[in-house]
Structure formats: C-alpha cells, structure tokens
Image (cartoon, helix red, strand yellow):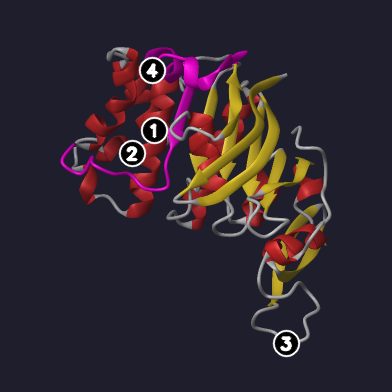
C-alpha cells in the first residue's frame, strides 16, 4: 500500500516548467531512490511532496488526504524532510538542533532526541556547536532531527510515516554513507516509507528497494517519470546511460553488482550515447515501469 502518492504533479519555478506531470506511488516499508541528472527536478519533487512547493496542477496525497490540507502539527507527526544543506542552526548545539525536530509536535521527546543522536553516532558531539561539525557530521545531525521528529528510533512499527531525504549522504565519507543508508533501509523494513534523492548509483543498488528515474523527454515540457519499479529494473547500465548521457557498464561478481561510468558523450567523441545535451534531446526516450513504485 502506498504511503504517499503524487498525482500528475506540474511545478514551475522562476518561469520554467520543472515537473511536467509526475505521477508515482511510494509504498511503505520501502526505500525508494530518486535518480536523474542535475536540474531535472528531484529536489523540487521532494519539496512538493513535503508541501513546501505549491504545484500548478496535480496533488500529493498522504494517508488519503492532500498534504496541503494537513495542519503543520499533523503533518510533522508523519512526514519529515532532510534537506541537502542545513541552514540557520549554526548558533545552536548539536542536541538543540536535533531537538528542533520536536518543535512542530509540541516539544518534549527528550528520549527521542537522545536515541536519534545515538543512532547517527553523534552522542559524543551533542554538546558542541552545530556549526563546528564537518559537512558530513552536519548531515548526520540533520537526519537525527528528522528521526527524532518521527519517533523513528523508539517506535517498532513505522507504517504510515514518510521520510524525504535530499542527497542525505553527499558529504559523508564512504563508511558513514553506507552506515547511514543502511540505517534508513532498516527503518524501511520497520514500515517507514523512505524517499531519497541519490547520485551514488552503487549505493542505490546496495541499499534501495525501489527506483524512480526523472528525465526531461521533451525539451521545455518539464521532467516526467522515465523509470519506476524494483531498483534492479530501473538502475541498469542501459537506462542510466540514457538518463545521464554517458556510457555505463554493469560489473557483477558473486551476486554483487556495480555500475561503472566508462565515458561521457560530451567528452568522448563517438561514444554513441546521446547527443551531449541531455534527456531533452531524446524525444520518446524509453521508459521502465508505470510510475507506480
């Protein structure tokens, strides 16, 4: 069953059509990776799902109700967001920053804050200024804030709750990136609906259960869903070669799979992949799946 549904979402920003009719269902107990080239609207999709961006057309439905019709406290109890960058929290301690996740729920929840800090391995830095942390540590703190908001570390059944994360491990080292994504995969197994914008395709293959690929099929018409379904059906060498205008090869060894980019068409003459100008030049690019993921 889908925890959150996007129906024919059309979003324009600064006079440009960003999303041109995106429809997708995101089930609970799953980790869906949203992939696509820079500028195709991945962040815009998450912000529209959060209710922070009002679409020109279409709607986002959470638990049978439109997100934009939910009150702030009701929405905060079931829907949390991890942005690409943390802003405005540099004068607070790490613990205070994580505790901000409880604000929209009326405060309290000290044990939820402590549990979240423990899960992201920041308990020993809790008293320090948030601004003193490295970029990767700040990302872990922002994730902890979302976990505290949802009581994700204390509740055994997270069905009906949704975590939206925009490139949540982009600044982390390889070890913490893997452990953080593994944590989100664990929460998904406990019922949480996790939707992550990701650029590390191999981390996607290792930790995600579902995939959603966005691309602009017709120039100027906004991005649409060009692939949706099980992650191994969406994140393939052929599909990613079209999506990123590059050449990918899939390496397999003992059941493990890894995607390797071997050439970018804009840099490698005669690569035979795309035109060097992105999905917008490939009218009618092939699609995987129906958008229901």
Q: Position of residue 69 (x, y in %)?
A: 48, 16
Does residue 91 appear left or right of residue 258 in this picture?
left
Q: Residue at x 45, y 27 (%)?
A: 80
Asked if residue 121 can be seen in this view, the reply is no
Q: Under tag 4, what secondary structure?
A: helix
Q: Is residue 130 above or below residue 62?
A: below
Return the residue at label 3.
269
290 falls in the magenta region = no
Dot 4 crowding, Cα within 10 Å, few <14, some 14–19, many 20+: few
Looking at the rendered image, the quarter that the C terminus falls into is: top right
Viewer-side label of 1, 4: 4
User: On the image, numbered disc 2 is attached to which residue?
Assistant: 122
Vertical side of 21 occupied by 150: above or below = above
Taking the view exactly as shown, the residue that stands out farthest to the bottom is: 269
Magenta region:
63-92
Asked if labels 1 and 3 touch by Cβ distance under 8 angstroms, the answer is no
Q: Report the residue marked by disc 1.
A: 144
Residue at label 4? 72
């Amino acid at each position: 069953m889908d925890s959150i549904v996007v129906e024919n979402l059309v979003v324009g920003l600064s006079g440009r059509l960003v999303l041109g009719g995106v429809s997708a269902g995101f089930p609970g107990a799953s980790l869906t990776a949203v992939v696509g080239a820079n500028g195709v609207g991945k962040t815009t999709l998450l912000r529209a799902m959060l209710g922070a961006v009002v679409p020109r057309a279409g709607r986002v439905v959470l638990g049978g109700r439109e997100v934009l019709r939910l009150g702030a406290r009701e929405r905060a109890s079931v829907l949390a967001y991890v942005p690409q960058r943390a802003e405005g929290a540099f004068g607070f301690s790490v613990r205070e920053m994580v505790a901000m996740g409880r604000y929209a729920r009326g405060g309290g929840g000290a044990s939820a804050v402590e549990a979240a800090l423990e899960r992201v391995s920041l308990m020993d830095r809790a008293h320090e200024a948030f601004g003193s942390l490295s970029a990767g540590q700040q990302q872990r703190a922002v994730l902890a804030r979302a976990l505290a908001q949802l009581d994700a570390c204390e509740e055994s059944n997270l069905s009906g709750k949704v975590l939206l994360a925009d490139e949540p491990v982009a600044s982390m080292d390889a070890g913490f990136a893997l452990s953080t994504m593994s944590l989100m995969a664990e929460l998904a197994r406990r019922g949480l609906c996790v939707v992550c914008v990701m650029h590390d395709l191999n981390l996607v293959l290792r930790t995600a259960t579902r995939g959603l690929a966005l691309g602009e099929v017709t120039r100027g018409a906004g991005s649409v869903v060009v692939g949706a379904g099980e992650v191994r059906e969406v994140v393939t060498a052929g599909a990613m070669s079209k999506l990123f205008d590059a050449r990918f090869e899939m390496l397999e060894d003992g059941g493990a799979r890894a995607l390797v980019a071997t050439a970018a068409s804009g840099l490698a003459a005669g690569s035979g992949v795309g035109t060097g100008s992105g999905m917008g030049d490939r009218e009618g690019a092939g699609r995987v799946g129906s958008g229901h993921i």
